Image (tube, rainbow, N blue to C red):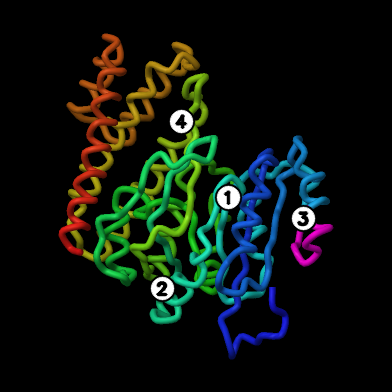
């Protein structure tokens, strides 16, 4: 990290790593930040009161790299508050949000800062990613079917109508845009959809985004071998409902845009979320409550059919079909990109 540079000479950048009980991956995330081809001014690791070996790992790392900032909360405050605290610490022009189990490719900061410098109304930058498994093996190439580099705030409101339209949540932010959008603090208890909400808030504040077709980060995707937890899925459905009902629908109505696509998406989301109804971690009371909030998100014939399929034990077949569709969509995207050269 070069302390001799000034903002007038080169944009300043910090990498912020929020972590909780991921000591085995933390060093890899930090090394990927240290290995950037673009000079990184600050690296912050903010620990949400981990109960594993994270403090010992950080003590060893800071002996080698004393310039890395490490803060450990005295109690667990949750991911939204922890990330907001981390992203608010640097005084740099740009900050990278990097989860402690993910890794950056060496050219990540250089490419995305270059694009952000070209488009001053871009609030964040993103790229294609490699999805990796628990062992770090590449399992899937996540690519967007998007040709434009810059997307205005109004375009972003339209493109994020069904969720966060990035390959993953490893993003480089403009600090000014983050502050205007209030980080993740509007809903500090959320554990799902907070990235989507933040992107929409940035668009409402007049910030667009930039996208690089290069594959510059590695995003770890986790399976839940014990089955889907009811509390997690309830939170996900409820946060989706709030974003659609309280944010996107009023924004579209205010602009005179057709809200039909949002209402279709609400039904589509509810139908998709219904595949959790067969989770072994759901009690019968959980299923009744979950069905109720699914109908609040997007009631319709498709949802009723999905609920019926779950009762008949057909959900595993539907999940296999969904995986096949995802694989097919990935293949089509690759073909489209190859055709474009």
Between 211 and 188, the one lying in front of the other is 211
**Rendered location of residue 32, percent (x, y):** 59, 57
| Position of 212 relative to 321 (above/below) | below
Marks 4/1: CA distance? 23 Å
Percent coordinates x, y for residue 334 in the rendering: 23, 51
Sequence-first disc among 3 and 1: 3
Image-quadrant location for residue 38: bottom right
Report the quarter where the C terminus lies. bottom left
At mark 3, the secondary structure is strand
Find disc 1 in the rendering and name its residue.
99
**Residue 67 colored in magenta in the image:** yes
Label 1 element class: strand
Residue at mark 4: 234
Which residue occupies the extreme top position in the image? 312
Q: Residues within 10 Å of mark 2 (few under 14, many from 20)?
A: many
Q: Do the residues labelled 2 and 4 touch (CB within 8 Å)?
A: no
Q: Where is mark 3, residue-wise? A: 71
Query: Which quarter of the rendering shows the N terminus?
Result: bottom right
| Residue 154 badge | none
Residue nearer the viewer, 296 or 336: 336
Decide: few, some or many residues near mark 3? Use Cα within 10 Å; few <14, some 14-19, many ≥20: some
Counting other residues with Cα less than 10 Å from the Cα at mark 4, is it few (<14), some (14-19), or many (20 or more)? some
Residue numbers of the magenta segment: 61-70
Mark 1 or mark 2: whose residue is earlier in sequence = 1
Residue position marked by numbered label 2 in the rendering: 122
């Amino acid at each position: 990290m070069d302390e001799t540079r000034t903002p007038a000479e080169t944009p300043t950048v910090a990498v912020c790593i929020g972590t909780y009980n991921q000591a085995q991956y933390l060093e890899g995330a930090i090394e990927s930040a240290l290995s950037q081809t673009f000079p990184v001014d600050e690296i912050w690791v903010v620990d949400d009161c981990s109960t594993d070996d994270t403090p010992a790992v950080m003590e060893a790392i800071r002996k080698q790299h004393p310039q890395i900032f490490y803060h450990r909360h005295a109690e667990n405050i949750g991911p939204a508050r922890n990330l907001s605290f981390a992203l608010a610490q640097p005084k740099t022009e740009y900050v990278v949000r990097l989860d402690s189990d993910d890794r950056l490719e060496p050219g990540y900061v250089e490419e995305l800062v270059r694009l952000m410098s070209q488009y001053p109304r871009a609030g964040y930058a993103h790229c294609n990613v490699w999805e990796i498994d628990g062992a770090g093996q590449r399992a899937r190439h996540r690519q967007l079917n998007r040709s434009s580099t810059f997307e205005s705030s109004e375009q972003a409101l339209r493109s994020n109508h069904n969720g966060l339209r990035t390959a993953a949540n490893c993003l480089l932010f403009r600090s000014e845009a983050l502050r205007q959008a209030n980080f993740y603090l509007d809903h500090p208890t959320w554990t799902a959809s907070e990235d989507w909400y933040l992107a929409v808030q940035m668009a409402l504040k007049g910030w667009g985004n930039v996208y690089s077709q290069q594959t510059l980060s590695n995003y770890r995707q986790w399976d839940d071998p014990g089955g889907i937890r009811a509390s997690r899925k309830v939170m996900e459905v409820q946060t989706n409902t709030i974003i659609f009902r309280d944010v996107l629908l009023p924004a579209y109505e205010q602009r005179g845009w057709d809200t039909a696509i949002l209402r279709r998406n609400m039904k589509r989301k509810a139908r998709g979320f219904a595949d959790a109804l067969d989770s072994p971690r759901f009690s019968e009371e959980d299923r009744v409550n979950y069905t109720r909030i699914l109908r609040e998100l997007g009631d319709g014939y498709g949802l009723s059919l999905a609920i019926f399929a779950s009762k008949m034990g057909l959900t595993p077949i539907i999940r296999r079909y969904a995986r096949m569709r995802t694989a097919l969509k990935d293949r089509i995207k690759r073909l489209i990109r190859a055709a474009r050269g």
